[in-house]
Amino acid sequence: MTHTEIIENLKKKIYRPVYVLMGEEPYFIDLISDYIADNVLPESEKSFNQTILYGKDTTSDMLITIARRFPMMSAYQVVILKEAQLFDKLEDELLTYIENPLNSTILVICYKYKTLDKRKKFLKVAAEKGIVFESPKIYENQLGAWISKYIGDNGFKIAPQANAMLAEYLGTQISKVANELDKLMILLPKGATITPADVEKNIGISKEYNIFELQNALGERDIIKSNRIVNYFASNKQTPFPLVIGGLGQYFAKLLKYHFLSDKSKNNAAKALGVSPYFVDTYIKAAKYYSPKKLVEIISMLREFDMKSKGIGNVSSTEGDLLRELTYKILH
């Protein structure tokens, strides 16, 4: 089940005795466990029937004893084990309870940043008795689609360039992305389309001076615009050097990949590069300026300048100096 399906069932008061929430992306785990903590029991019942435990401070005997208690003047009790990844030998210690859980207990196990051993009996039994949810990591090439869906699910739209600005600037930490999107949607009327100007005004990402615009300027070999953006980065220091290097690395790697696509149709290129079809034309144009050989040189330069920014092979150059030199070498 997806996190959306699980929450929809919870809204319908369809409860299972065991929820094992695990995976690399903590955002979806928190989303489900927070919904259970906030909504399953009324406030008047929580003091007696809701228990929050933490893996590092909890023993199996303690957890099982609490889970086997009957609720007081309520149909259910909620027991949430947070930071379960710090609970020693969880699969072995809790198997006996999972095999025969109390139907009046809703046990939620939050196992973040990794998954439990799928070869062991624990997960198979947990799936039979309740819900096992794996929270997937959202990768860079999936982030734009995730932002569009999140915005759409909340009754808004987003312009492609605004989407790209958010994806480049915020990265793949989904909790951070969702938090910024929530703030934006509070400020805009329902059904509005989020524009680059909205992003600039409310999140502080300049629609003219950001990594996305630097990529475009370099892709078009626009020397004046490239240097203007780089000088802005150097003087304002709001865009960390590693973020610039990382963004350019992804951009030029995608450009190199485009050169070797056998099917360069817009839809196939968009899928292969992990970008919106709206942006494929910019890659087509940039590919005319940058040969595969030049792109390999640029990717090598990016690694070199990343090392220099860490002090390796560099004595006195500032990050601004390095960025200006790197830009010059890319464009010449």
Image: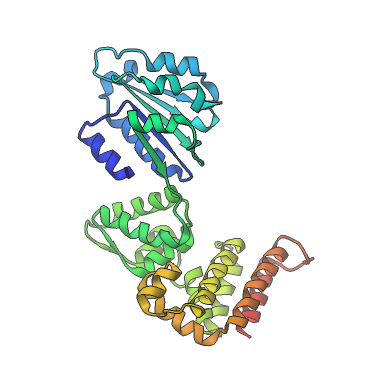
In-front residue for pair 172/99: 99
Q: Is residue 19 left or right of residue 54?
A: left
- Closer to the camera, 228 or 104? 104
Identify the residue at image location x=44%, y=27%: 81
Q: Give percent across and percent down for residue 113.
A: 51, 41
Q: How many marks?
A: 0
Horizontally, residue 102 falls left or right of residue 236, namely left
190 above or below 216? above
Image quadrant assignment for residue 132: top left
Whether 72 is drawn above or below 291: the answer is above
In the image, what residue occupies the spot 29% across and 51% down? 186
**Quarter that holds the C terminus:** bottom right
Front residue (pair 142, 210): 142
Q: Position of residue 237 (x, y in %)?
A: 59, 63
Dividing the picture into quadrants, the one containing residue 77 is top left
* Residue 93 in sight in this render: yes
